[in-house]
Amino acid sequence: MAKRTRIKNELLRVRVQVHGTMAHSTSQCLIFVLGIGFFTLCFLMTSLGGQFSAKRLGDSPFTIRTEVMGALESRGVLRKMSDMLEMMVKRMDVLARLENSTDFRKGEEARFPPDRSVPAAGLMERIQAIAQNVSDIAVKVDQILRNSLMNGKVIEGRRDQCEVPRDPKYPDCSGKVEWMRARWTSDPCYAFFGVDGTECSFLIYLSEVEWFCPPLPWRNQTAAMPSSKPPPRGQAAFRSNLSYLLELIGSGKESLIFMKKRVRHLASQWLLATQSLAQKLKGRRRDQKQILIHIGFLTEESGDVFSPRVLKGGPLGEMVQWADILAALFVLGHSLKVTVSLKELQSNLGVPPGRGNCPLTVPLPFDLIYTDYHGLQQMKQHMGLSFKKYRCRVRVIDTFGTEPAYNLEEYATLHGYRTNWGYWNLNPKQFMTMFRQRKVPASSGGPSLCQEPWPSATARVPAASEKSQGT
């Protein structure tokens, strides 16, 4: 009897150990199942999300990892997850058989209440369901990766098979492509806009940055289109306080100090002129213009030969004219930006890095640009094709004026007229001289500043000997 009791107690102890092992294994399995579920969710978010955001490097560590992993690696991870779950199912099956083979089923509910552990059968069903879900996910991810790979190959094939279009609306396209093939490395600005030496990069640049080739049909045309509507203009209001203008002009150069002295000296006269003009306009609305004022002769690149001579009897005519223009535009209520260095000019215009062969990175943010011949030359060197596009917005401070015969490059070259300051092909109204402009009759039908009003090279233009300087 004692021997039978001892054997029974030993079997009970083994049973307790078995149930403890099963409970411990069950809790571990639950934690593992939860971990597998969380990992699966993260994997799906990164795999699927990363595949569709391959252009956004650095969005998150998940995106970077997904972009590094290829299709084979992604499928391999899913297979490993499925194998691990199948292994868990097998181990749980062994534990279940061990439980069913125990002779001490009787009294189990009293010794081990149901709420102490999760039934093995229910846990196995959950693990099998997760394993099946992971298997289905692996198939879907495999399909998505295959489709993404095929689409990528199609796009790459299109990019590799770009051909120069033969469109009569773009007659210069083929010639520009030939030029790009030979010289695209001559200026870093081409690489800045994405040119990498391939035929497609040439066509993308020439159709979206410049305008010599037609748009490529497989490109996103909405991204390349400029904004449809400019922002609404504010209303210009007359100003009577010139303190802010003095801050805009700045200091550090004798020429700027002289301009500020002149503005202060004539402040009362500017105030009277403002009041007189306001009475004439009678509250009429005027749009506020964005105006860039680039004083080119004061930049270090031009030599700035005037500033050292201001207090030594040097010429002051240009500085007088600049001071009056600054004051007039300011009291009229326009928004001004004043620059006296090439670096400031490039920053305000949106010049791309390089040697100035590419257009501006953004549409010109200014309605007008007041500058001189030094500034005009700097703008032409750094604006690329944008200089020709926006040259109608330029106003040149030309103290004594330039004769039309020297302004038109074709006419001047044909007739042998040489000058260091001409050949700009601007409308004569764009030159701001110290001479009063004669009124043009309304019936004359004068051309707009943004049009090409020039006669042919054989047309009759007054020469230097026939017309006085400055007309």
Image (cartoon, rainbow, N blue to C red):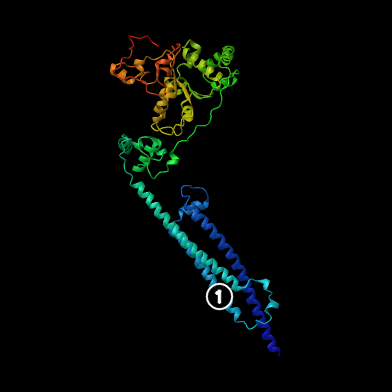
Q: Position of residue 57 (x, y in %)?
A: 48, 47
Instruction: Say whether residue 322 is left or right of residue 187.
Output: right
Q: Residue at x 53, y 50 (%)?
A: 60
Q: Position of residue 215 (x, y in %)?
A: 38, 40
Q: Quadrant of residue 145?
A: bottom left
Residue closest to the far front: 443
Q: Secondary structure at mark 1?
A: helix
Q: Position of residue 245 (x, y in %)?
A: 56, 20
Q: On screen, 269 above or below 454?
A: above
Please give the residue where the numbered disc 1 appears in the rendered image: 93
Q: Position of residue 128 (x, y in %)?
A: 54, 69
In terms of depth relative to the viewer, which is nearer, 447 or 28? 447
In terms of depth relative to the viewer, which is nearer, 365 or 221? 221
Q: Quadrant of residue 468?
A: top left
Instruction: Say whether residue 302 is left or right of residue 283.
Output: left
Amino acid type indicated by mark 1 = Asp
Q: On screen, 440 above or below 341?
A: above
Q: Residue at x 40, y 26 (%)?
A: 380
Which image quarter holds the C terminus? top left
